[in-house]
Image (spheres, rainbow, N blue to C red):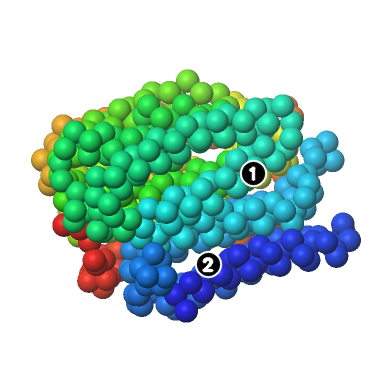
Amino acid sequence: MLMLPELTIIGTAFLLIIVDLFLHEHRKAVLGGIAMAGVLLALGFTIGMMPQSGELFGGRFAVDSVTWWFKLLFLLASLITLAISIDLLDGRIDAKHMALQARGEYYAIMLFSLAGAMYLASARDLVTLYVSLELATIPLYILTAWKRDTLSSESGLKYVILGALASAFLLYGLGLMFGLTGEMNLEAIGRSVTPSPTFWLAAAMVTAGISFKLTLFPFHMWAAEVYQGAPAPVTAYLSVASKAAGLALMFQVFYRMMGHQLMAWAWPLAILAALTMTVGNLAAIVQNNIKRFMAFSAISQAGYLILGFLGNSDEGIPSMLYYMLVYILTNLAAFAVIVWYSNQTGRERIEEYRGLARVNPLVALAMMIALFSLAGIPPLSGFVGKFFLFSIASKAGFHWLVAVAAVNSTISLYYYLRIIRQMYIEPVGQETRALSISPVLAVTLAITTLATGAIGIIPMVYETVSAQTISWFLPFIH
């Protein structure tokens, strides 16, 4: 059954809510294991069904190779996030720092968001696309305000207001597309639409709504405040799953619905990418809070990511999927350290990481590898991913954009080195001590760190996978 992974996730979410009602407080640690087991089961179904393609409900729900890959990315991001959430939710932190409450609801809401993202990748008409997007997004508003303190509540409110504005832009643009063509199916719209002032207005409105989800300039203003105020595991999830959902939405709109006009939209996309990576990198330099720092890092990474839309689908889609995989593993490796350190000490300022390499050398090493990969240092996977995307832009004739991206990568190395300097060069703070790490978090950190290195050291794996799956990446709008 083509919808089996989504049904597994939704069933697991409801199971968590029901089981939570009958468990005593000291036994609720099992809820994290149930949530991870459900995601693993859905991941197994997805891998087993990947060669298949088909559609349900009159073509409103469909799967092809790209759809399966997006679902793999969503499931992987959620699985890692659940693993790094367990410490905070189960209270394995110092007594002076309170664990989050309502564990069953937390896991269930995250799984509902995951289900929405998975449906988004399979949506083939305007209504299904929009409803899936809201199912993926609305739970994130709740998770952002989960701590129920002033900062978290303020972040949740800002996210809701700006998210509603972005949804209005998107919905208005989609409505104009329907009005121009009389079609609801995405590919039918792509075949029917013709360039006109109304079409370009609709394209601009849709791009604005997508830009909010992907934190593209100038729709990035929500990210820093929301990342800082949300609980650390939620920030980790926002940084990868929300971006992957935005990429899936952009793929659906730009390749399936606007594919015939995509080349005419290349210059605005190139300018958007250049501004996004530049603003993100320059703003990150002056940040002192580690979560705000990672927010602007995520903004700059979004600028690199959309370079893939400048090329044809046969090259652009594999490159973007690969870079999204790299970004999920690398960013969540960094966030695993941030979540662990925040849980143990309550510290979130960059200078408070001083001397970490002397008291927890393996954790500091994992953080350094993740930061170097985000900066694009060879032979790590971040370098390989950027190389593929830069090649796409170069082949499309945007050599100036490649130069801008290269300069921005150099700038990013400077501010990533700020954290590495605190960990390895600055003296140990008087209050710094060796900190324990739970087995689940240690295994998660080890796997993500090793994967960050391995995917870059063995780039032939990417070439083999690309060659085997390129024939699955159909149908596209060319």
Q: Is residue 361 left or right of residue 418?
A: right
Residues under numbered marks 1 and 2 in contact, where contact means CB atoms less than 8 Å apart: no
Residue 325 position within the rendered picture, expressed as x and y whole percent measured from the top left:
40, 56
The residue shown at (80%, 40%) is: 98
Name the foreground residue: 170 vs 424: 170
Residue ID for mark 1? 143
Q: Quadrant of residue 404?
A: top left
Q: Which mark is residue 323?
A: none
Q: Amino acid at mark 2?
A: Glu
Looking at numbered disc 1 in the image, what kind of residue is underneath it?
Answer: Leu
Mark 2 neighbour density, 10 Å: few (under 14) some (14–19) many (20 or more)? many
271 lies left or right of 422: left
| Residue 288 at least partly seen | yes
State the SS at label 2. helix
Q: Helix, strand or loop at disc 1? A: helix
User: Is residue 174 left or right of 148 when viewed as pictured?
Assistant: left
Residue 458 seen in the figure: no
Residue 426 position, x and y percent, is 57, 27
Say which residue label 2 marks: 6
Q: Which quadrant: the C terminus?
A: bottom left
Depth order, front residue of 464/274: 274
Q: Residue at x 55, y 30 (%)?
A: 161
* Side (left or right) of 151 relative to 184: right
Q: Earlier in the sequence, mark 1 or mark 2?
A: 2
Looking at the image, is 176 positioned above or below residue 271? below
Measured Cα–Cα span from mark 1 to mark 2: 20 Å
Q: Crowding near pointer 1: few (<14 within 10 Å), some, many (20+)?
A: many
The image quarter containing residue 375 is top left
At horizontal 79% and vertical 61% (from top left) the residue drawn is: 20
Coordinates of residue 89 in the picture (x, y in percent) = 74, 50
In front of the other: 287 or 307:
307
Residue name at image x 68 percent, y 31 percent:
153
